[in-house]
Image (spheres, grey):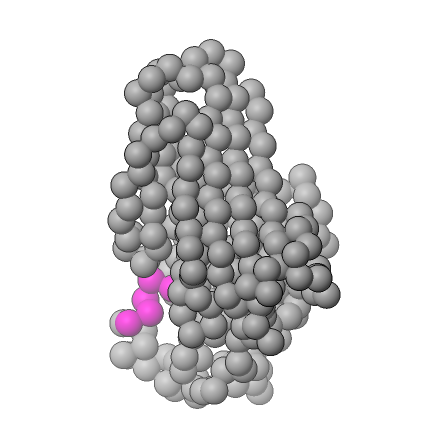
Amino acid sequence: MKWRLRVVHTTGYRYATPVTQSYNEARLTPRSDDRQNLMVARLETVPATRAYKYVDYWGTEVNSFDLHTPHTELKVVAASVVETTEEPPPAVDATWAQVRSAESLDRYAEYLEWTTYVPKHRELAAVARSLRKGLTPQETVLAVSKCVHGKLKYQRGTTGVHSSAIDAWQAGEGVCQDYAHLTLAMLRAVGVPARYVSGYLHTEPDAAVGETVVGESHAWVETWTGDWWGFDPTNDLPIGHRHVWVATGRDYADVSPLKGIYSGGAATAIEVTVDMTRLA
């Protein structure tokens, strides 16, 4: 099955006093690969700016823009149209010896590192090792993902944008960012290269053509078990036509959709909406 989706991601800021200057980076442009084809994308801001595009270290397209005129509001609208299909099951299931070979460890070292969001943790490592027993690397990925899905309750407000995998594990609650970070922590503990994926999720599996729904900024994981493949631990399902991927990295810090610095008053309100329309 193939879907054609329009994604409109709007972010709005209001400031207590005028902002005199700011520099911003937006990672909001979907990528193209064998499963997903980006047809068109544009970024607009109010006040208007000129964006400069570049590709960062992780291969993500970045739109950078700066403002040097006083403003009390900033709106960023990223619109794109993509075609998506189901991701086929992984064709290769490498052995543990292959996953842990010197070549693999060197090539994928960055996706085995501990980070602020994905720290080393003795209890998580012990749980991951217990799940791994008797399983192949690919089977281990599924077992860990299902464990995380069962462990966490999806709940907004318990964790924040700066929460780590350990915070979510101890709280037993979190959002998609936490599901992804926790899955990464457990997989890296047993030596499976794993990376964070940011993107969008269409929320209606049976959406009619032309129907616009409230979509979600979403996160899932990709792992290397002979080849890269993705899985969504939040929803306990493979990556499909409802998933639109934007960026990959070691954790959320590498792929945050919009970040920057500014000089001026504190932000008094932040509005984020994602509208998704099935076009075909």
Which quarter of the rendered picture does the C terminus lie within?
Answer: bottom right
Residue at 40% across, 82% down:
226
Q: Where is residue 43 in the image (x, y as percent from the top left)?
A: 41, 42
Which quarter of the rendered picture does the N terminus lie within?
Answer: bottom right
Quadrant of residue 240 within the rendered picture: bottom right
Q: Where is residue 10 in the image (x, y as percent from the top left)?
A: 53, 39
Q: Is residue 204 visible?
A: yes
Range shown magenta: 107-111
Name the side, left or right, on which 79 lies relative to 32.
right
Q: How many marks?
A: 0
Name the side, left or right, on which 25 lies relative to 93.
left
Residue at 28% across, 53% down:
55
Quadrant of residue 68 within the rendered picture: top left
Quadrant of residue 31 within the rendered picture: bottom left
Placement of 28 over or under 19, stated as above or below: below
Residue at 68% across, 51% down:
213
**In front here: 51 or 58?**
51
Residue at 71% across, 47% down:
155
Placement of 268 over or under 41, stated as above or below: above
Q: Is residue 130 visible?
A: no
**In front here: 64 or 188?**
64
Residue 93 falls inside the magenta stretch: no
Q: Where is residue 59 in the image (x, y as percent from the top left)?
A: 32, 58
Q: Main secondary structure of the magenta part?
A: helix
